Amino acid sequence: MTAIDAPTGPSRTPAPSGATGLSTPPEHLLRAAPAENFPVSPIVLPAAVRAHFNAVYAFSRFVDNIGDEAAGDRLALLDRLSEDLSVIWAGGEPELPVLRLVARTVHARDLPAEPFERLVEANRQDQRVTRYETFDDLVRYCTLSADPVGRMVLGVYGLATPDRVVLSDRVCTALQLAEHWQDVAEDLAAGRIYLPQEDLDTFGVTEDDLRARVASPAVRHLMAFEVSRARTVMDQGAPLISTVSGRLKLALAGFVGGGRAALDAIRRADYDVLGGPPKAPKPRMARFALVALAQSAAPGAPAAARTAAAVATTTSATGVAARRALEEGR
């Protein structure tokens, strides 16, 4: 599972029939794009850029389909994908159809291998890990499953500076968290729980409680806590919008607004996500996007973005160690 399954609507789009094999053509994957929960290739972007966005989407969806739905040995399939992926940066021509499309974008925009490799590793982890003990553990998973997508987008634009990357990571992590909070029931049906085990214990929530048709008060309190935490992460990354201009600014405001609308939809559902993912109506998504855009144009927004990037960089590097030290000192 990756952040391509962004959380602005109903449950994530299942793979089209026949779209879970290594030989899947990219056109097959792109046919599913209009049904995704966010605009895969926003119309506000120039046609040439949209083509690169489509390549990023096709790759992300391709890896996700194999990791979530492919028949047979998924780890072996992911290994084969990874081998062919490495050919792109070795100067060769990959064999898999989706990767041939990706190669054109990689070479045109000089994209590094790491974000692509991270998405593959995220899906490997999904085969081995079904529970996360702490929130820090879950955030580390998001560095594989979510953050790479934002880095690819910035790379397509040639804007992957350190300050922008650290803010983008926060936005993408928040989007991934929002998706996890929306899809609690769906993920549990697939054998996975992304809610941190330490939080389940703190709020007195059991796995049986998550299997109920209606959320108990304890589950609602837990989800309110998780929504608040994801909103904070999104707010930390939202200054990214003020660091870009033109059509990309509009697209990023849409992503941030969509994530905030998804979290708000959970709130409006009184934090009951067990009957299915709460849906954010499109007018509400648009309103949140406009608010994000207006905030990015406020006086002092660029300076605030620099401060936010510095804080995010510091907390990314030291956050886990600091929390552990604090706990040990109690």
Image (cartoon, helix red, strand yellow):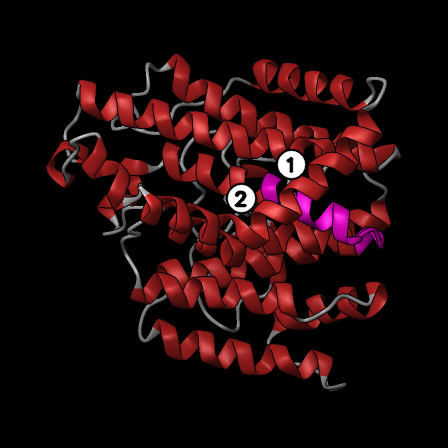
Residue 167, how many percent across, how many down?
68, 42
Residue 316, how many percent across, how many down?
57, 50
Q: Are marks 2 and 1 in contact (CB under 8 Å)?
A: yes
Let me know if residue 295 is in the magenta part. no
Residue 206, how many percent across, how many down?
14, 37
Q: Which mark is residue 237?
A: 1
| Residue found at x 72% / y 37% | 42
Mark 2 crowdedness (10 Å alpha carbons): few <14, some 14-19, many ≥20: many
Residue 61, how many percent across, how many down?
53, 55
Write down the quadrant of residue 58 in the picture.
bottom right
Mark 1 crowdedness (10 Å alpha carbons): few <14, some 14-19, many ≥20: many
Write down the quadrant of residue 221 in the picture.
top left
Q: Which mark is residue 245?
A: none
Segment colored magenta: 156-171
Q: Identify which amino acid the numbered label 1 is placed on.
A: Gly
Q: Is the residue 62 above or below the residue 88 in the image?
A: above
The quadrant the C terminus occupies is top left
Tag 1, which secondary structure? helix
Tag 2, which secondary structure? helix
| Residue found at x 51% / y 48% | 319
CA distance for labels 2 and 1 = 9 Å
Residue 131 seen anywhere in this rendered image of the structure:
yes
Classified by dominant secondary structure, the portion drawn in magenta counts as helix
| Viewer-side residue, 282 vs 126 | 126
| Viewer-side residue, 203 vs 91 | 203
Q: Identify which amino acid the numbered label 2 is placed on.
A: Thr
Q: Residue furthest right?
A: 246
Write down the quadrant of residue 74 in the picture.
bottom left
- For label 2, the residue is 173
User: Does residue 121 appear to the left or right of 31 in the view shown?
Assistant: left
Let me know if residue 158 is in the magenta part. yes
